[in-house]
Image (tube, rainbow, N blue to C red):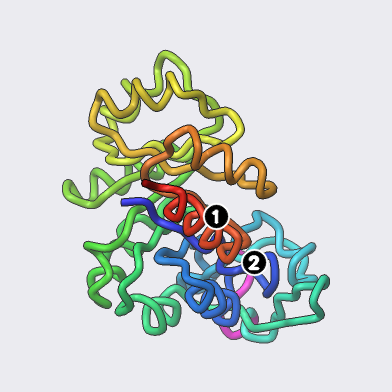
Amino acid sequence: MFVIYAHRGASEYYPENTVSSFAAGVDMGANGIETDVQISRDGVLMIYHDDSTKEKIGFEGSIADYTYEELRAARMKNEKYGREDVLMTFEDFLKYFGWRDLTLAIELKVRGIAGKVIEMLKKYGAYDKSIITSFYYDALEEARAYDKNVRIGWLYVKHNDKTVEKLHAIGACQACPKAIDIKPEHLEALYAEGFECRAWGISDTEVMKYAVDIGVNAGMTVNFPDKLVEYMKEKEGKTP
C-alpha cells in the first residue's frame, strides 16, 4: 500500500512533531504519520527528532538531559509561519493518533528504547499498524530480539550489494532509502526479495515526483503531505 506519511506531521507548515503538525497532516489527507522517539532523563518516551535540543527548543544538551517536567516548559516553533506548540510524549501521541486509521512509522532516535516503544504501541492498539524504523541497525536488532513479529523498516542512504542481505538478517519488511539515491534497478532487487520500499529525504516536489514515478511502492515521508496528495490525485486522473 502506498502511504503518504506526514513527516513529523505537516512540518513544512507547523512546528514539527507536535499535535498541531500531526493533526494538520491528517487533515491534508495523509494516511500515515512518521515521528521520532527519544527518552527523557526520568524514562518518559518523548517525541523529538534532533540529537541536540539547542536549535529547536533552546535548551542546552539533549532530551536525555531533562526530566519530563522540565521538558513541559519547552516550545517547538515553526518560524516560517510564526506557530508554536508543546513537546509531546509518545504516549500522548498514541492517545491522539494511535486509534485512527493511519499507518505509523516510528523512528528510534536512540538505542535502548525498542522494548518500551513496542509495549506502548501494544497498549494503545497501534502495534499492527506500526513500523519500527531507525538508521541505527543495532537499535533494530534490539527491536527484533524483543519481538519476533514487529514490523521493521531500515533507514539508510544508498543501496549497495549488502543491503538485501542486511534487510533479511534483521527480518525487515521495508527498505527505506534516501529518495534521490533510489534507482529503478534497486527497486527491482528489493521487490524480487519481497521487500517494500519507502522513500525519505523528500527535499522538494521534484524529488517527491521522482520517487513516485520510478515506482516506490510503500509511500514516502513528506513535510508537505498536501502536495503529495495532490500529485497522487493527478496521477490517478491520468490513469486510463
Point out which mark residue 11 bears. Answer: 2
Packing grade of label 2 (10 A; few <14, some 14-19, many >=20) is many
Determine which quarter of the picture holds residue 167.
top left
Front position in the image: 37 or 235: 235
Q: Is residue 9 above or below residue 148?
A: below
Label 2: state its secondary structure.
loop
x 72%, y 82%: residue: 84
Q: CA distance from mark 2 to mark 1?
A: 18 Å
Q: Main secondary structure of the magenta part?
A: helix
Front position in the image: 42 or 143: 143
Residue at mark 1: 231
Residue 68 part of the magenta segment:
yes
Disc 2 residue type (three-letter): Ser
> Residue 51: percent from the left, percent from the top?
65, 54
Front position in the image: 172 or 227: 227
Determine which quarter of the picture holds residue 126.
bottom left
Residue stretch rendered in magenta on the structure? 64-70
Point out which mark residue 147 bears. Answer: none
